[in-house]
Amino acid sequence: MAGEKTKEADVESNKSDIFQDQNVKNFVLYKTFIEPLFWGAVLISYCQVIAGMDLPQVFLMESVACGLVASLDVVAGALADVIGRRKTVVLGSFLRGFDVLIFAIATCPWMAWAADFVWAVGFSLMSGADSALLYDYLKEIGREDEYLKIQGKGESQRLILTAFGSILAGILADINMRLTAMVSIPGVFFACYAISRFKESRPSQKFSVKSQIDVIKGGLSHVWRSSKICWLIIFFALLSVVSKIWFFSYNPYFELAHLSYTEFGVIFFLLNIVAWFSSSHVADIKKFFGRFGTLALMLNAIAIPITIMGFFVCRASSYLVMFQNISRGMLNPVIGEMVNEEASSEIRATVLSAKSSFSNIINLVLFPMFGYATAAFGLAVCLQFVGICTFVFGLLALCVYKQVFSHKS
């Protein structure tokens, strides 16, 4: 009895000290450095200038990569549920670093394709597994209510570093664009090292085809039966797909508005500051607006600015990308928390991977269509169309939310 009281007292005394936990420290470091910090501001221009690709080719390459992710996501998630999440996340993060290395030495379109292929495999291994790894650990120690805060801190630290990295990227791109990829390599490999030190106590199973198939079937069956998870997957797909299309339009839009690479860097600095703020305060924002209000905020932060940018192409409109980054900072933590609440531990990574897989199936279809539509009708008209469709479909989704979630927020 005395021992139990002491244990309860220890838990209570550490209640406000979750970031001193070694696993949490390692996870936050992983989230902070897993994305390249210095080339997001010039990524599309990098593919065009260094790899010699045009915009439709870039969109086609990305759509094929998304198709590969869609085909691997659920399988990789089930693999993580069977053999352990840490193993798959470590391998995936290593491949992420290798992908940046290939981009850094690319000299032709085929090397860019090879790098994107490696990215797709690495992303599939990490997708869902990292979130499930953290959530299961927090649930094990009775701290799952702090999931959103931890994810938000990792995202926000990455975004603030990316913000300052974007300024450097603009300067480096004017000197030699290849430098933006080269200086991004060490950080990603450091993320691989950090997550390799995460101690996973959840027992893993010996891999077998039967166990893999059983987990996939169980996870997909759970998704199909849960109207809440289905709604979350569809709404996440809407916002994430449009955000990705919009992101890949940043560089060509800035060029259309006659911005220099240095100004690219300034805008990416500012938008990452916005994303950092929304990510670091995501728990407070959700508490203030409620669940429904937060979802509505993310929708409007994407749909309205992208429509305005399409109708008014100018330097001032370029800065409207700031609003999308309100959603960017919150989308994964908010939707991830909601999906985690609805999924059991045994199939959690599989269900989270299904969320990502569905989004990438949509990307597979829409990316080449958007790329060739920009060549046929112009980027501005395409942004108008995407913005209006996003608002209409998002509004319909929010109306359905009221029925699916029974007015709870």
Image: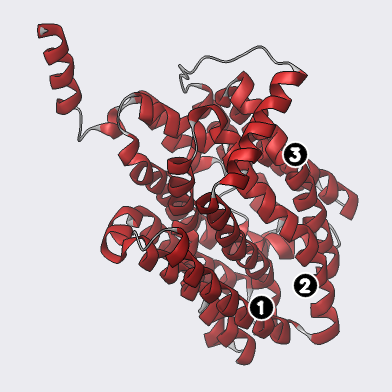
Quadrant assignment for the N terminus:
top left
Q: Position of residue 367 (x, y in %)?
A: 77, 65
Q: Tell me the SS state at disc 1.
A: helix
Cβ atoms at labels 1 and 2 below 8 Å apart = yes
Against 64, residue 196 (above or below) is: above
Q: Earlier in the sequence, mark 3 or mark 1?
A: 3
Distance from Cα at disc 3 to Cα at disc 1: 27 Å
Tell me the residue that label 1 is attached to. 386
Badge nearest the viewer, 3 or 2: 3
Pick the front one: 180 or 127: 127
Distance from Cα at disc 1 to Cα at disc 2: 9 Å
Q: Give the quadrant of residue 248.
A: bottom right
Tell me the residue that label 2 is attached to. 370
Q: Amino acid at mark 3?
A: Leu
Q: Earlier in the sequence, mark 3 or mark 2?
A: 3
Q: In the image, 7: left or right of 75?
A: left
Quadrant assignment for the C terminus:
bottom left
Residue at the image position 30 percent from the left and 66 percent from the top:
289
Q: Residues within 10 Å of mark 1 (few under 14, many from 20)?
A: some
Q: Amino acid at mark 1?
A: Val
Tell me the residue that label 3 is attached to. 72
Residue 186 visible in the current orientation? no
Residue at the image position 66 percent from the left and 55 percent from the top:
359
How is colour applied across the structure in the image? Answer: secondary structure
Residue at the image position 65 percent from the left and 53 percent from the top:
180
Q: Position of residue 51 (x, y in %)?
A: 83, 57
